[in-house]
């Protein structure tokens, strides 16, 4: 009987190591489902999800009304001022005017960043200017003013959009400057 004792201990040690490894795998994989039809137990290891749970997106609709004031100043300079009124249930964090390239300067914004083909010679075909923020959006029921001066020979029909995060943007019609290669008469920043 003494000859079988070391092999019994070895068997117990091997069984404990196997149980510890199985337990470690179960913990690493994120869970276990045990079902027991009749007298047979089946163990299924469930993998840990590889994607993060969906984040809660604000619900509602991005809606805005844009009013425009255009003034023809001296020497072929035009001043455009767009007032964006948030009429929806979501904030507005982006405002864009599409149109041909013109050299914009004295850009007016409520502390937002901006870029486009009209800003300091950037290359964004069809996108005259886009203002964007992630910290101070226009809240529902509020308004903000955006604008610029430009040397051009007139105005054209333009398309604008207002947006917020991944929500569908809203598009509308406005006026913008005609295409112009006349240099800016001030800073484009």
Image (cartoon, rainbow, N blue to C red):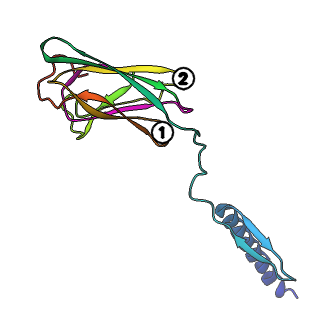
The tag on residue 118 is none
| Residue placed most toward the observer, 102 or 1 | 102
Q: In percent of the image, x 18 and y 31: which residue is there?
A: 121
Kindly state the secondary structure of the residue where label 2 is placed: loop
* Quarter holding residue 132: top left
**Residue 73 percent coordinates (x, y):** 19, 12
The quarter in which the N terminus is drawn is: bottom right
Q: Is residue 110 visible?
A: no
Q: Does the magenta segment cover residue 102?
A: yes
Drawn side of residue 125 relative to residue 5, left or right: left
Q: Which residue is mark 2?
A: 141
Kindly state the secondary structure of the residue where label 1 is placed: loop
The quarter in which the C terminus is drawn is: top left
First of labels 1, 2 by sequence position: 2
Give the CA separation, mark 1 to mark 2: 18 Å
Drawn side of residue 146 relative to residue 120, left or right: right
Instruction: Read off the magenta span.
Output: 88-108
| Residue placed most toward the observer, 155 or 167 | 155
Q: Does the magenta segment cover residue 152?
A: no
């Amino acid at each position: 009987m003494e000859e079988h004792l070391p092999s019994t201990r070895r068997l117990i040690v091997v069984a404990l190591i196997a149980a510890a490894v199985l337990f470690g795998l179960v913990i690493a994989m994120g869970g276990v489902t045990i079902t027991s039809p009749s007298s047979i137990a089946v163990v299924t290891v469930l993998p840990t999800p590889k994607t993060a749970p969906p984040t809660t997106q604000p619900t509602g609709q991005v809606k805005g009304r844009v009013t425009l004031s255009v003034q023809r100043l001296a020497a072929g300079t035009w001043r455009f001022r767009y007032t964006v009124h948030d009429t929806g249930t979501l904030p507005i964090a982006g405002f864009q005017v599409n149109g041909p390239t013109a050299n914009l300067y004295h850009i007016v914004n409520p502390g937002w960043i901006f870029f486009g083909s009209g800003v300091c010679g950037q290359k964004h075909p069809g996108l005259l200017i886009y203002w964007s923020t992630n910290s101070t959006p226009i809240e529902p029921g509020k308004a903000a003013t955006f604008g610029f001066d430009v040397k051009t020979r007139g105005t054209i029909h333009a398309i604008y959009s207002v947006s917020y995060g991944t929500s569908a943007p809203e598009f509308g019609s406005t006026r913008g400057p005609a295409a112009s290669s006349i240099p800016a008469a001030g800073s484009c920043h």
